[in-house]
Amino acid sequence: MTMTTKPSLADAPATMTVPLLDLKAQYATIKPDVDAAIQSVMESARFIQGPEVTALEAEVAAYSRVAHGVGVASGTDALLLALKALGVGRGDEVVTTAYSFFASASTIALLGAKPVFCDIEPRTYNLDPAKLEACLTTKTRAVVPVHLFGQCADMPAIRNLCDPRGIPVLEDAAQAIGSEWQGRRAGEMGIAACFSFFPSKNLGGIGDGGMVVGQDEALLDKVKLLREHGARPKYHHHVLGQNSRLDAVQAAVLRVKLRHLEDWHAGRQKNAALYRELLAGTNVGLPEARPEARHIYNQFVVRTPKRDALKQALSEAGIGNEVYYPRPLHLQECFTDLGHRDGDFPESEAAARETIALPIYPELTGAQVAYVASKIHALLGAR
Ligand SMILES: Cc1ncc(COP(=O)(O)O)c(C=O)c1O
């Protein structure tokens, strides 16, 4: 089928396969540059730290409109080391959302601090600032809003509550590199921000990777120290750090991919707009893109009380999908000692029951979007 005009539901083929994410399709578009970058690291034999890592740190910082970037081994380590650099430890409380990837909360607990959960807004899935004040105590050492699915949390509202109390706000921007709120980019709005380069992110590596970015030179320098066993110079250990470095080969590939990131964001935004148009007549709940936000659509998450039936129908139709996340953080077994129960965070719990992510990756064709939309129409019908 040739797509000269905007696709409509009538363009949906009877059957096709649509993966949730197609990294092979992405690789096909950048193969010569990626291969050359890997080759160049092989030939340089500089596998740990070195010029590729330093260059990526500068480029990601510049892209995020901040002064500093420190590459680390994963987004999880970015959070762990940033929290540690902020001094979070035993006896402290750190507030984050009850509806996120596990690492948003596990990193707090791994440092011996208590994760204090805050419920979310039902349509953006981000931390609800209206519910934040009740979570803040004299023990609150930091607040970690998550820019979930690629849309920033309402940072000004969060900062309005935290700044007068002297509480630093650390952005969990693992899913949100390049996203903005009122023209300010993820990384610019908190004391620091943490990115993940997990392969499924908008800027994804060929393995694990992460980065802490920010303006605060002293804080970022602490992260740098912590990622290398707390040693400076080598073999002289000031603090208890760990090994959490970003590989040079990851950095080299990420540098190639960073050059395409804006186009890839635009591709995802175009697909999101098409979904919105084609799904407008159904009973499926569309994600709210706030007018203040530049949403980079790491995920396009819809909701329906018939989520499990929708999941089954999509899977049977050959359409990749995923539930992010089927169990909110406060109800995870490992957090039993926090004493939470069903009903504590109703919006997070409802989101865990009702949401499902659809394919949104930039290489998706209009026909594929129309096909996904046609299957949703078939199940959830017209309003
Ligand atoms: C919101 C959020 N925070 C933290 C992380 C952790 O990143 P990583 O998988 O790179 O350790 C992720 C990764 O999926 C995430 O989505």
Image: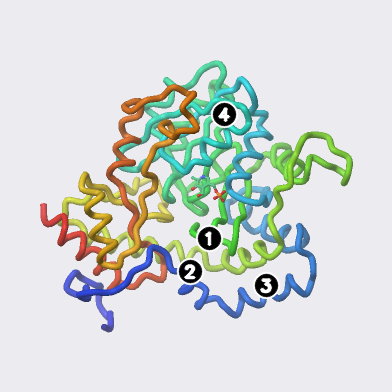
Amino acid type indicated by mark 2 = Leu
The residue at the point 23 percent across, 54 percent down is 310
The x, y position of residue 288, in whole percent, is 31, 47
Q: Nearer the viewer, residue 140 or 295?
A: 140
Front disc: 2 or 4: 2
Q: Tell whether circle 1 marks a residue whose Cβ is less than 8 angstroms from ligand 1.
A: no
Q: Quadrant of the N terminus?
A: bottom left
Amino acid type indicated by mark 4 = Ala
Residue matched to label 2: 23
Vertical arrangement, residue 159 with respect to residue 182, above or below:
above
Q: Secondary structure at mark 1?
A: loop
The residue at the point 66 percent across, 32 percent down is 86
Q: Give the spatial CA distance, label 3 vs label 1.
A: 16 Å
Residue matched to label 3: 38
Q: Which mark is residue 199?
A: 1
Q: Earlier in the sequence, mark 2 or mark 4?
A: 2
Residue matched to label 4: 142
| Furthest residue toward bottom | 2
The x, y position of residue 72, in whole percent, is 67, 50
Front disc: 3 or 4: 3
Q: Give the spatial CA distance, label 2 vs label 3.
A: 17 Å
Callout 1 crowding tier (Cα within 10 Å): few <14, some 14–19, many ≥20: some
Left/right placement of residue 318 relative to residue 97 reads left
Amino acid type indicated by mark 3 = Ile
